[in-house]
Amino acid sequence: MPSERILWAREASVRGKLMKRRLCKRRTIRSGTLSRLVLLLSGILLVGLILFFSSCSQGGKKVEAGGPMATVGVANVTKKSLGRELTLSSELVPFQEIDVYAKESGYVKDLKVDYGTHVKAGEVMAVLEIPELEAQLQQDQEEIKNATNQVTRAQHELGRYQAMYKALHLEYTRLNGVFQSQPGIVAQQEVDDAQGKDLAAASQVDAGQAALDAAESQLGAAKAKLIHDQTLFNYSKITAPFAGVVTERYANLGTLMQAGTGSSTQAMPLVRLSQDDLFRLVIPVPEAYVRDIKIGEQVDVRVPSLGRSFPGKISRFSVEVRSDTRTMHTEVDVANPQRVLLPGLYAEAELPLEERTDRPSVPVQALSHEGNTTTALVVSPDGTVQQRTVQVGIQTSTYAEILSGLNEGEQVIVSDRSGVKPGEKVHPQHIEVLEYHEPPAQ
């Protein structure tokens, strides 16, 4: 029995080794098959990549019955309206900006404005206390009253003199008439005495009239002095000469304001006033573009910090080119009714230089520049590429004017230009050229 068990164990061991060898062989076969499959897929992928990059490097060539032919993007030569502009940068400044001084010296009794206060033309910004002028006005009133009384007295005296003269002149006239018509009735002495009294009364009337004129002159002078002093006193109210905003304040309540009419360096302004509904954009125009600047031309003013554009107008220029900078002082007025613009903001002005309408034009992508020569690739009706030398006029960011070398309706290549050569056959395909437009003025 033991020997049989030993034999059975040996047979079981041999069978186990055989099974293990068969399993290892099967795994080896499966691993080899998987490796060959991976190598096959890698080869297919590599061939696909090679074909893909080969097609990309050929610039869109496609195989037709007659052989390889490139597809190129083209655009027609069309008539367009083109304009040339010059962009210059500067700072916005108020149309008017002044320091407001006091006309008469006085203490600030009432201050009605501060930083950022908007005022209208003629609005009171501060009131000064001027005691000397107040006393002077009272004195002027008394002088006018006294002069009025003098005029009244002179009028009464003149009336009395005129009455006396009327009676004496009538008496003289009667005596002289009797003396002339009936000699001997009236003595010559009586006529002479009446004539003397008549002349004396006439002199008194003249003197009374002169006294009245003098009194009236004194009254007029007193009234003129009152008007003068009242005008000076009215300057105690400091008003805004134009509508604007207060950008600086120099005085406080109780500050002694010196009169700003003299040459004294102690005079201090009350406030600084800036007009905020209209701005100036002062730009230096280079000498080469001076001939294109015209009064009244509309200008697009762009303020980068606000992200907006505003309409402007060329309002004035110096009509002189400075010798040091070779530029001309030019001003563009920019309205600011909504008070959006602020002094000192950086702005760019696009000045219109020239504009041409209905001119043959092509996209700028269709042109090649080599030195002083400009060329374009044209696709003929049979699909052949031709190289033309062209003369270009004004040029914008998108289109260029063609003066010679191209005709309206011809097709020019605007894309894939580096992949084709003159004389080559191509397949033209029209593409849309994107145009750049500035945002509209607001």
Image (spheres, rainbow, N blue to C red):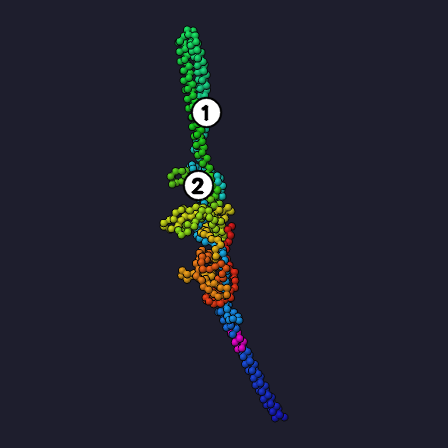
Of residues 7 and 105, the one nearer the viewer is 105
Q: Amino acid at mark 1?
A: Thr
Q: Is residue 143 above or below residue 83?
A: above
Quarter of the image for residue 168 reads top left
**Image location of residue 312, percent across then percent down:** 47, 48
Of residues 167 and 297, the one nearer the viewer is 297
Residue density around tag 1, few if under 14, some if 14–19, many if 20 or more, within 10 Å:
some
Q: Earlier in the sequence, mark 2 or mark 1?
A: 2
Q: Tell whether label 1 touches label 2 (CB within 8 Å).
A: no
- Residue at 41% x, 48% y is 329
**Image location of residue 61, percent across then percent down:** 50, 69
Majority secondary structure of magenta residues: helix
Say whether residue 144 is magenta.
no
Of residues 241 and 287, the one nearer the viewer is 287
The disc label shown at residue 269, or none = none
Q: Which span is picked out in magenta?
A: 39-46
The answer for how far apart the CA atoms under marks 2 and 1 are is 40 Å
Label 1: element kind:
helix
Q: Is residue 189 above or below residue 330?
A: above
Outermost top residue: 184
The disc label shown at residue 148, or none = 1
The residue where tag 2 is placed is 100
Outermost front residue: 382
Tag count:
2
Q: Is residue 423 above or below residue 153?
A: below
Of residues 100 and 201, the one nearer the viewer is 201
Residue density around tag 2, few if under 14, some if 14–19, many if 20 or more, within 10 Å:
some
Q: Amino acid at mark 2?
A: Val
Quarter of the image for residue 395 reads bottom left
Name the quadrant of the N terminus: bottom right
**Image location of residue 21, percent across then percent down:** 57, 85
Whether residue 144 sits left or right of residue 6 in the image: it is: left
